[in-house]
Amino acid sequence: MIKRIVIVAVTALSCSLTAQEFATYKNGFIYGEETMNKLGKIVDSLNLKYKTCDLNQVFDSKLQTKGYSVVLKSGLIAQAKKDMDMNISFDDFMKKYPEAVVKKDLLLIKSKAKNYQDKDIIEITEISVNDDYGMEIEIPYKKELYTKPAKNKWVYSYSKKTSYSEEYIEAFYLLDNFKSIPLAPKYSRQIIYSDCLIDTSLPKLKKDAKEGRLPDGIPQNIRKLSKTEKEKLLDDFRSVHVVGLCSQDNSPRVQGVYLALLSAETANWPVFLKSHLDIMNDRFDRSSDSSYARERRQTYIKELETLNINVPDLILGTSFRIENPANNHYYANISRSGRAVAESKDRELFLSQLLSMMGDETLDDYNRIISYFFYVSCNHYIKNEREKKINNIKLMSAVQKLPKYLADQIKPKKI
């Protein structure tokens, strides 16, 4: 008898439960043979569709520049804020406020985003090349602020003294204007392939999905349902946004697997691939998450490799950070993608391109450092110690080809 998909702890409602992964069919995958055959036919048609896409489309890098971070937690902080408003020079600022903590030669990224109140903001983020967290400053979005020249300007976040915290100011001093450059055609084509295959026309969840728990009374064997029943159940799953209560609550991943299964059974490819990629990238909302729980969650990259998908182009195409993405463009989690690639049959091809990207002077600094992060994550999860050491030697050589201000910040990784 063919083993059914058994979803463990479908009704996980407390943090006392242990997060577990999913049972498989005889083919070794979390989707049965018939389902995989259906998906394979869809992939074949999408691969043909890709050949008719506009392969000359150009994608631009995220807006980026170099700068300094400044943190002032004592002294005349309110006056420092006024001086920044008056655009005091960096040298004069340091003479006046020598107690300020400064980090120099940072890669800074500017993005349009939404805050927790769903208001438009501008985020300026420090990209830390090591394990510490980079500083981030948010300001209300205004088009003129997003596009105006920024060379030798200050951007800051000021906090007054309260009963909970002391007065302080965090700031970036921008050494140049933010710039975006076009990606080379070979990289843009990978983005085009990922967009074509994922199908950006339809989001995974419905726009009016409300936060909640998994639907009640989920059938154990959905393949016995009629197509109408499957479509109704898929609609139910797409209508709720499941948020994990903690790292032990695996209900968001359970929702992801059911979305993938039901969309596969009903030939709803856009929902299927986004759902499977979310499982691979562990892209789910949780109130909290622990490292040991993350380690137990699998990537299931082999399911994609069996479907005649160009997995390197798919994953790398979702890894570039760009200024002009398509609506619903899918961004990979670099750390999780690195773990998935460590299990891939095309691992050497992945790692070869990542090394090449690090040394590509035509590629923007942000995507070059992302390729470094990707490589480090992948090598961390490789089990063969000899292979890891060889890869680390290659990595340290490639690091020297990065822009000097980034290479100088990278601490050698011991294997």
Image (cartoon, rainbow, N blue to C red):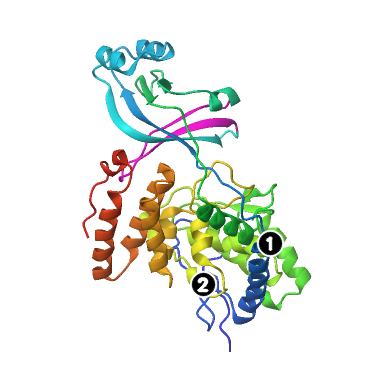
Looking at the picture, how far across and down is residue 255, in whole percent? 59, 61
Q: Nearer the viewer, residue 258 or 356?
A: 356
Label 1 neighbour load within 10 Å: few <14, some 14-19, many 20+: few
Q: Is residue 12 visible?
A: no
For the magenta stretch, what is the residue range? 119-142
What amino acid type should be assigned to the residue bearing mark 2? Glu
Label drawn at residue 305 = 2
Quadrant hosting residue 237: bottom right
State the residue position of label 1: 52
Q: Nearer the viewer, residue 379 or 348?
A: 348
Q: Residue at x 56, y 46 (%)?
A: 59
Residue 164, placed above or below residue 241 = above
Q: Amino acid at mark 1?
A: Thr
x then y, percent, for residue 50? 64, 63
Quadrant in the picture for residue 168? top left
**Position in image of residue 280 (x %, y %):** 49, 62
Picture residue at 63% right of the left edge, 75% below the top: 40
